[in-house]
Image (cartoon, helix red, strand yellow):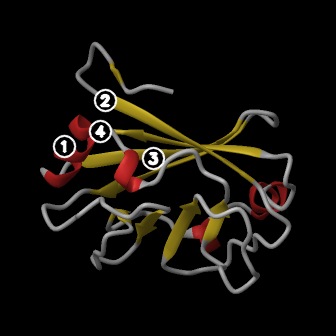
């Protein structure tokens, strides 16, 4: 999907990813989507693989707004199941948004090239377990929608 600017001035982008049998979604402080095709159970923050974008690939307007310390609304959507989880996180001028494979959302204020947002309301462990279990199927599509 290309970036959309809504009448309200909100800019939206989406990252499409797939499920994987090793997704556990048990990390207490982070949530991640990766372009990597394979993961081990040790990657307990990962909620999607084979993503079509990383933070590096996001539109420059979205990146600019995130770096202006914008408040982000982030949604994880399972279109095949009609399920969605939405939460808020913060941008920061410290965010590089330059990693070629990963998108990481953090409860803490820690930043690195992989970080999309900080001070998140949730991490992967906070997800509804039924939602997380659906991510364990490689056929499951998960959409990470970013609204700034």
Q: Residue at x 17, y 53 (%)?
A: 67
Which of the 4 image quadrants contains residue 126? Answer: bottom right
- Where disc 3 sits, the SS reads strand
Q: For this view, does 23 lie left or right of residue 5?
A: right
User: Do callouts 4 and 3 mark residues in contact (Cβ within 8 Å)?
Assistant: no
- Pointer 1: what residue? 65
In the rendered structure, find residue 74 and report the number of the disc placed on it. Answer: 3
Residue 88 position within the rendered picture, expressed as x and y whole percent measured from the top left: 39, 52
- Pointer 4: what residue? 148
Which of the 4 image quadrants contains residue 97? Answer: bottom left
- Pointer 2: what residue? 11
Which mark sits nearer the N-terminus, 1 or 3? 1
User: Do callouts 1 and 4 mark residues in contact (Cβ within 8 Å)?
Assistant: yes
- Graded by Cα atoms within 10 Å as few (under 14), some (14 to 19) or many (20 or more), the crowding at tag 4 reads many
State the CA–CA distance, disc 4 to disc 2: 5 Å
- Graded by Cα atoms within 10 Å as few (under 14), some (14 to 19) or many (20 or more), the crowding at tag 3 reads many
Q: Which mark is in front, 3 or 2?
A: 2
User: Do callouts 2 and 1 mark residues in contact (Cβ within 8 Å)?
Assistant: yes
User: Do callouts 4 and 2 mark residues in contact (Cβ within 8 Å)?
Assistant: yes
User: Do callouts 1 and 3 mark residues in contact (Cβ within 8 Å)?
Assistant: no
Q: Residue at x 63, y 69 (%)?
A: 46
State the CA–CA distance, disc 1 to disc 4: 7 Å
- Where disc 1 sits, the SS reads helix
In-front residue for pair 47/16: 16
Q: Residue at x 60, y 74 (%)?
A: 45
Which mark sits nearer the N-terminus, 4 or 2? 2
């Amino acid at each position: 999907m290309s970036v959309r600017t809504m009448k309200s001035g909100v800019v939206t982008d989406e990252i499409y990813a797939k499920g994987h049998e090793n997704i556990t979604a048990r990390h207490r402080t982070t949530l991640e989507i990766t372009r990597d095709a394979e993961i081990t159970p040790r990657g307990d923050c990962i909620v999607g693989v084979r993503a079509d974008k990383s933070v590096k690939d996001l539109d420059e307007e979205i990146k600019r707004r995130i770096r202006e310390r914008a408040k982000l609304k982030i949604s994880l959507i399972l279109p095949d199941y009609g399920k969605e989880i939405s939460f808020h996180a913060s941008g920061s001028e410290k965010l590089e948004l330059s990693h070629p494979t990963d998108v990481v959302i953090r409860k803490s204020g820690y930043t690195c090239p992989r970080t999309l947002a900080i001070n998140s309301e949730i991490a992967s462990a906070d997800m509804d377990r039924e939602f997380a279990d659906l991510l364990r199927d490689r056929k499951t599509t998960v959409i990470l929608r970013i609204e700034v």
